[in-house]
Amino acid sequence: MCSDLSSSQVKQVKNAVKAAKRKLHTGRRGNPGNAAKYITRNKALNRLQIKLPEFRRLCILKGIHPREPKKKFEGQNKTYYHVKDINFLLHEPLLEKSREIRAYEKKITKARAKYNTDLAHRLQNNRPSFTLDHLVKERYPSFIDAVRDLEDPLTMIHLFATLPADTTHSVPFERVHSCRRLSLEWQAYVTRTHSLRKIFVSVKGIYYQVEVSGQKITYLTPHVLNQVLPEDVDFRVMLTFAEFYETLLGFVNFKLYHSLGLNYPPVLDPRLEQAAAELYALMKDLAGGTTSAPLLEDASAKEDDAPVSVDEQQSLMEAENKEKRIAESQARLASLQDRLKQIEKEKEKPQDDLETRTCRRLFQNLTFFLGREVPRESLLFVIRSFGGAVSWDGDGAPFPENDEVITHQIVDRPTQGHKFLSRHYVQPQWVYDCANNRILLPTEPYLLGRIPPPHLSPFVDNEAEGHVPEYADTIKRLRLAANQQLAPLPGSESGIDEGELLVAAAARRREDLEAEKERELAAMEKSYAEDLRRELAGKSFSGEEEALADVPESEVLPPPKEDDPKDMAKMMLSRNKRNLYQAMEMSNTKKKEEVKLIKERKRKADEKERKKKTRTM
């Protein structure tokens, strides 16, 4: 049949086929379809000419995620990416750098295969390196964008700071040490600025909420325990995230430290670092205190004693005294200059808000001592963030346990061998509850050996949940008493000013008028129903009072049912909004059932406790 067609007709047929294929890929004319917008993962790998692990690593570092097209044109079991994202990866410098590193590793392997150890060692030392600085600047154009996205980085950095270095799971020691250093620097900054707002200790770990640059950041830190690395976790993916988050948090810490006029990175005291008190060493450095140098052996003691004349001894003593006086005068002058600079900075610095002042003064006049069994780093972080002084049982402690300035000792054991009468022995929960509620709670419920009150989460709005725990109500009254405000008794109106009383009286008057109107409407409806019954019974409307008991029930019409405004409003909603409203109603019903279950459990627990007390009596 093709032989019967001319060459021009064959060309027209080919053009029509091409146009049909183009329309199939693009849908309507001028509007690209899914096949032009999206690409499968295998095709993306072929276009980039890399393996799947390297592709995953690039996507994590660049922040590229899989997409879900409306119509999966190559099957439901495929992973799709946007074509623009893949083209974005084509021009990434890291892609070329990875190819360069792979070629360099082949050179090292070849040198080792030829037993050329010198060349292999030289190539190993000159391995090409790369940085992720350009990715941080690319993904976060401004500093506030990076601060808003700090929740996942802080959680990941604090997780790797507690993991053991393991060669089986390819967790390098350098990564763990870097994460540990960054986490301590972050905690030291929060402590210096008193930015900690909320703490909650859970089974997963300890939740912290800090306020930095006007942004509230909530992150999770694990408990300090012996970590066991699971086998079903892909640590390569987590290490890729940690690698990017290290660079991001380094940028943020640098900016935050320089905003306070501090040097970055801060210098650690070697003696405190060896004693595993890195956080205290950083806090000490940021506070402007002089870090104590490690103990060194006196070199002069090692030298042999040589005979010295009296004149030489006097001249040496005078020279030493002169040098001491010069050094003391220079030190006083330097401290005076530093003090003047600090006063000028305080004048220029804007005043802290009320929340920061409250946090800074909570533990201001208190001194704590931490036992060996309590989480030292967490309590040190919280106490110093709220203005308290703290020491511990171990090397590098600022003051010993028998110091008389200690007001509270944090212990978590059933009994204490020796006690000082001048201090309170409380459990660690007392510190967290005081920090969350911004008041010094009574220490009696938290004393040694007692079962403490429930540790309430500060992230939960009890009134919105529909259930206020009993201890939350007690804390509320304590807060009002601390602020010199009296909580009104149930049913009373104390604590309400005259304006509020007038508003309440006007509201009650409106309610009375509405109730009176409803009663009149009910009376009119009743009269109308009676007229209907009389009409059905064939009786006259003479206005005489007739007994309604003679009217048969089957002939009596029910009163007209009023349309519920809520049902009418539901009918006017669209389907999506109606479904959303039904989901909200189901959620509220579920919440009410949970509150009912909690109250029932509380009632049973109180009843059981009451029976137990009656038995003991």
Image (cartoon, grey):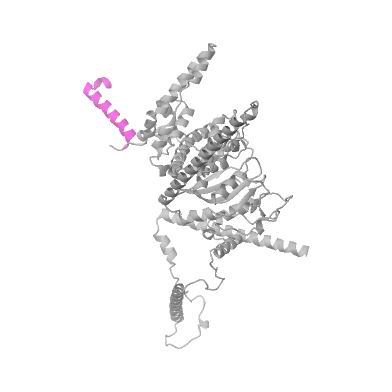
Across and down, in percent, residue 521 comes to 43, 77
Whether residue 171 is visible, yes or no, is no
Horizontal and vertical percent position of residue 464: 51, 59
Q: Quadrant of the N terminus?
A: top left
How many numbered marks, from 0 up?
A: 0
* 507 lies left or right of 373: left
Q: In the displayed structure, does residue 209 sit left or right of residue 20?
A: right
Residue at 49% x, 53% y is 356
User: Is 177 situated left or right of 14 in this image?
Assistant: right
Residue situated in front as seen by the camera: 460 or 479: 479
Q: Answer with the quarter of the image where residue 561 lies.
A: bottom left
Name which quarter of the figure residue 615 lies in. Answer: bottom right
The residue positioned 56% from the left and 36% from the top of the image is 318
Task: Report the front residue among 119 and 194.
Answer: 194
Chain part drawn in magenta: 1-28
Q: Position of residue 376 (x, y in %)?
A: 62, 44
Q: Residue at x 43, y 68 (%)?
A: 563
Q: Is residue 485 visible?
A: yes
Indicate the quadrant containing the C terminus: top left, top right, bottom left or bottom right: bottom right
Nearest the eye: 614 or 305: 305
Of residues 27 and 306, the one nearer the viewer is 306
Residue at the far front: name it. 311
- Image location of residue 529, percent across then percent down: 45, 78
Main secondary-structure element of the magenta-colored stretch: helix
Is residue 5 part of the magenta span, yes or no?
yes
Image quadrant assignment for residue 232: top right
Above or below, comparing residue 34 to residue 423 in the picture: above
Q: Is residue 455 magenta?
A: no
